[in-house]
Amino acid sequence: MSISLRRLRYFRSIASNGSLSAAARELNVAQPALSHHIRKLEADLDVKLLVRSSRGVELTPAGRIFAIRAGDILQQIKDTETEIREQIKEPNGRVAIAMIPSLARHVVPVLLRILEEAFPRIELSILDAPSASAAEFMNSQKAELALVPNPVEIREAKARAIYKEPVHLVKTSSGGVSDNSPIKFADIADIPLILPNQEHDVRRRLEEVAIENRIQLNVRFNQSAPDVIYAIVYSGMAATIIEAAAFASDAGSPALDIRQIVDPQITRTHSIVRHANAPRSLAVDAVEDSVAKAIAVLVSEKKLRGELCP
């Protein structure tokens, strides 16, 4: 038995319109010819799909199942045709990517240079947002991609781990001389801290480690706004714990100590995330690969202190 796509389209139109005559007009097919195709379809399946009445046609239980499956098949074919056509074109169009500020300040300039040289017809929109907001942008379909450390918060996501970096204690230096040596987790217990709120992935991980090691963190301020955290750290009122990228432009400055936390080491893995069920787009693919290239450049130039994921 072989069911043609034409008969799938015919049946789907009848099911949607609830009438043979309305479907015939929509398809620009003579009604007798349409009826003939449906009778052949029912004969091939050996089941009744439609019941004709004075009000039009009604689907049988088997007809309702077949209408759903026919719609799925036709949509898959349409998506495949779109994907194939995209493959023969130059990537173009608007692509929105959500990105946390601590990485955006480093990644975006390199990313824009790569896209400008390789894919000039792509219009990139940067949504600079904390990780929780980035997840909201993805979940609401406002962004096609996200560069985030917590992809589990994004529904129906396909994540590609791209970069991981240990978190650091960042504080003002004593005596104007920077101390960039590692520091044990236990040794930060008495240091006043400003940390993001509990919904932030770094804060959750720090509290897990503190509980595991029976250490009480001295959290003096709860604040998720990056600019406020930077201001408090530079004022000397408190230190913070974050990946070094957030203060990378100040690394080596006598004003700050940027000390990797060890025993245990705490790492934050960043992933490029896309919608798992979205049709493939050449432009989205190009931006995803370009983000990976931008981060690889920054790691090789030691502007990011972490390492690429395998």
Image (cartoon, helix red, strand yellow):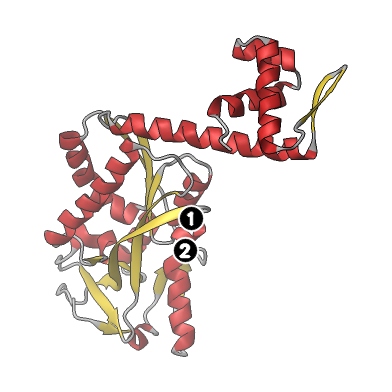
Quarter of the image where one finds residue 189: bottom left
Say which residue label 2 marks: 200
Residue 17 image position (x, y, % from top left): 71, 21
Extreme residue toward the bottom, this view: 214
Relative side of 266 to 216, left or right = left
Residue 279 image position (x, y, % from top left): 44, 39
Residue 30 image position (x, y, % from top left): 65, 9
Question: In percent of the image, x 34 and y 76: which residue is there?
Answer: 266
Q: Nearer the viewer, residue 106 or 188?
A: 106
Q: Few, some or many C-alpha atoms within 10 Å of disc 1 (few <14, some 14-19, many ≥20)?
A: some
Earlier along the polypeptide chain: callout 2 or callout 1?
A: 1
Residue 173 image position (x, y, % from top left): 22, 73
Quarter of the image where one finds residue 309: bottom left
Q: Few, some or many C-alpha atoms within 10 Å of disc 2 (few <14, some 14-19, many ≥20)?
A: some
Callout 1 amino acid: Ala
Say which residue label 1 marks: 132
Question: In percent of the image, x 53 and y 53: which residue is there?
Answer: 155
Q: Mark 2 and mark 1: span between their CA atoms?
A: 7 Å
